[in-house]
Amino acid sequence: MANINVSFQVIPQVDGGDIYAVIDKAIEVVQNSGVKYEVGPMETTMEGELDHLLDIVKKAQQACIDAGASRVISMVKIDYAPSGVTMEEKISKYR
């Protein structure tokens, strides 16, 4: 399968804790995954194979729970094209 882009946002429920510290744990999962990624102010975008990227999202959600969140809401966007799609082709003209 060709490369695709998956963007996701985790919204952890943290009672009396630091929400950003929990989100940092989700981002660590992405950083340690070996996929190409970019962290944005509202979501993280990754590039790779769909099944692998969705597995990373699942692990990021669990990392939030492991870091103290009682619940995690996740928003996921998938950009798929049979020939493949890259982050670079979308944003290179802005850099």
Image (cartoon, grey):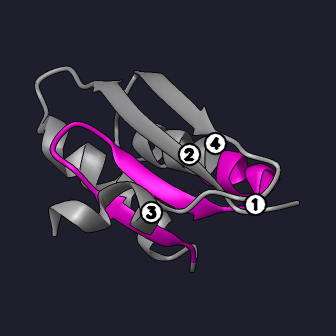
Which of the marked residues, 1 or 2, is nearer the chain's N terminus? Answer: 2
Task: For label 1, count other residues whose C-alpha is less than 10 Å away and answer few (under 14), some (14-19) or many (20+).
Answer: some
Under mark 2, the amino acid is Val
Image depth: mark 2 or mark 4 in front: 2
Could you give the CA–CA distance between mark 2 and mark 4, rounded to whole angstroms?
13 Å
Residue 6: assigned label:
2
Under mark 4, the amino acid is Lys
Residue 46 shown left or right of residue 11 in the figure: right
- Magenta residues span 35-56
**Residue at x 36% of width, y 49% of height:** 44
Residues at circles 2 and 3 in contact by the CB criterion of under 8 Å = no
Quadrant into which the C terminus falls: bottom left
- Label 3 belongs to which residue? 89
Q: Nearer the viewer, residue 24 or 39?
A: 39
- Label 1 belongs to which residue? 49
Under mark 1, the amino acid is Glu
Q: Quadrant of residue 94?
A: bottom left
**Residue at x 46% of width, y 46% of height:** 66
Residue 38 point in image, percent of width and height: 33, 63
Does 83 sit above or below residue 15? Answer: below
Residue that protrudes farthest toward the front in the picture: 93
Could you give the CA–CA distance between mark 4 and mark 3, rounded to whole angstroms?
27 Å
Which of the marked residues, 1 or 3, is nearer the chain's N terminus? Answer: 1
Under mark 3, the amino acid is Glu
For mark 1, give the secondary structure: loop
